[in-house]
Image (cartoon, grey):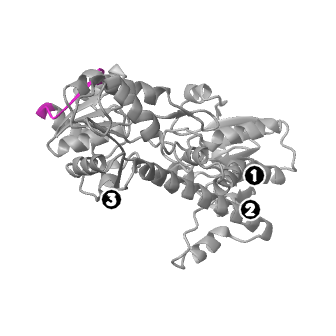
Amino acid sequence: MRAVVVALGKIGLPIAVQIGLRGHAVIGCDADPRVVDQVNRGVEPFPGEAGLQDALSELIPAGRLRATGDTTAAVAEGADLVIAVPPLVVDSDARPDYAILDAVVRDIGRGLRAGTTVCIETTLPVGTTRNRVAPALAELSGLRSEEDFFTIHSPERVYSGRIFRDLVAYPKLVGGLSEPGEARGVELYESFLDAEVRGMGSAEAAELTKLAETTYRDVNIALANEFARFADTLGVDIERVIDAANSQPFSHVHRPGVAVGGHCIPVYPRFYLAGDSAARLPAVAREVNERMPAYAVDLLAGDLGDDLSGKRVLILGVTYRGDVKETAFSGAFAVRRELERRGSLAVASDPLYGAEELRSLGFTPWGGESVDAAIVQADHSSYARLDSSDLPGVRALVDGRGVLDPAVWVAAGVAFRRIGRP
């Protein structure tokens, strides 16, 4: 198989490597010259992906993977499979901006040859493959869709840092615009994956599956957050309640927390809602989860006499999840806004970010000075070792992720709270 992978980011490059490891010839395309250069030198352009550097060190000298900045030329060499993983940029309300996706589709379409199958792995609103991608490819190439070339959708279902493991663990979903196109897509993916490759019957079914996965998680977390808020009024430990409920095999309640962040869970329910205007639960779940940063501030204010005006409050962790240097839709931004709305001086600290990086994100870096209170926003593993000597002056602390030892803080006389846990 001859393959082209467009966008060599944290998803695209491991996919290109996976194809190459199975003996196929792969061209990787990226608009960033630095990424192209590093890949061609056999150097991973981003750290943290298990097995990636070793694979590059094998594939590049063997000539099974090369990188280029010219997508059109790479596709024009006559690929059997083109996989595109361009980011679908969204605004602060998670409304999609198709500019990057459209640009990538244009580059592919201008080089498209008969016999190629084009797959978009980026998560998409339902109908995008059929109504946006395929017509553009046909117009740009002059070829007939589902006759001269095929367009399919196969949503990525992997986590950065463990992609090669996830490619083995989870079924690969493939949805086409025609029965022959889907069958060809399944055949091509089976040539480099060990996991089950499952035909979905249509591109729309594949698109909807990814939105269903992530929307389910958002709704479930919102329910857990509602339970946690109620548990706070009762003085009940919601962790014990959830563990007990989940001991019954039909219950799978998720965990509450200060925020739901990341590229996926806060975003894809909005994609779903864009297609299903009658849906109610996903919209309410988004409202519940978006309220949690303010709820954490409510808890903090309650222990400081309800007045945060003039108080210095430390936000511990600006990333959206622990030990991952990513801030997409991080709850830290909402926590900061709520603190500032109440007149407090919000400062931030994160073991993964320096002072200038924090400033570039709009945060005031904490320099170790005395603070009145703190909120744990990210569950960095290093936070488990914190004690009161690390936070001079702190009188109140809300652990929004349940990573701290309460006994340490209570013994130091700090008013300590966890969401949904006495």
Q: On screen, 220 above or below 371?
A: below
Q: Mark 1 points at which residue?
A: 295
Compared across the picture, whether 184 is left or right of 416 comes to left
Looking at numbered disc 2 in the image, what kind of residue is underneath it? Arg
The percent coordinates of residue 384 (x first, y second) are 55, 54
Question: For the residues marked 1 and 3, what is the alpha-carbon distance in whole angstroms?
Answer: 37 Å
Kind of residue sitting beneath label 1: Tyr
Q: In which quarter of the image is residue 9?
A: top left
Q: What element carries label 2?
A: helix
Q: Which residue is drawn at 19% across and 29% down?
A: 78
| Residue 81 sits in quarter | top left
Pointer 2 with pointer 1, Cβ within 8 A: yes
Please provide the residue range marked out in magenta: 61-71
The residue tagged 2 is 229
Whichever of callouts 3 and 2 sits on the residue coming sooner in the sequence is 3
From the viewer's perspective, is residue 376 above or below residue 404? above
Q: Residue at x 44, y 53 (%)?
A: 205
Horizontally, residue 165 falls left or right of residue 350, namely left
- Residue 124 — which label? none
Q: Observer-nearest residue: 378 or 149?
A: 149
Determine if the magenta segment contains residue 102: no
Image depth: mark 1 or mark 3 in front? 3
The answer to whether 174 appears left or right of 96 in the picture is left
Label 3, on which residue?
A: 169
- Mark before the other along the chain sequence, 1 or 3: 3
Q: Quadrant of the C terminus?
A: bottom right
Looking at the image, the residue that sits furthest to the left is: 62
Helix, strand or loop status at disc 3: helix
Of the two numbered discs 3 and 2 in the rendering, the one whose residue sits closer to the viewer? 3
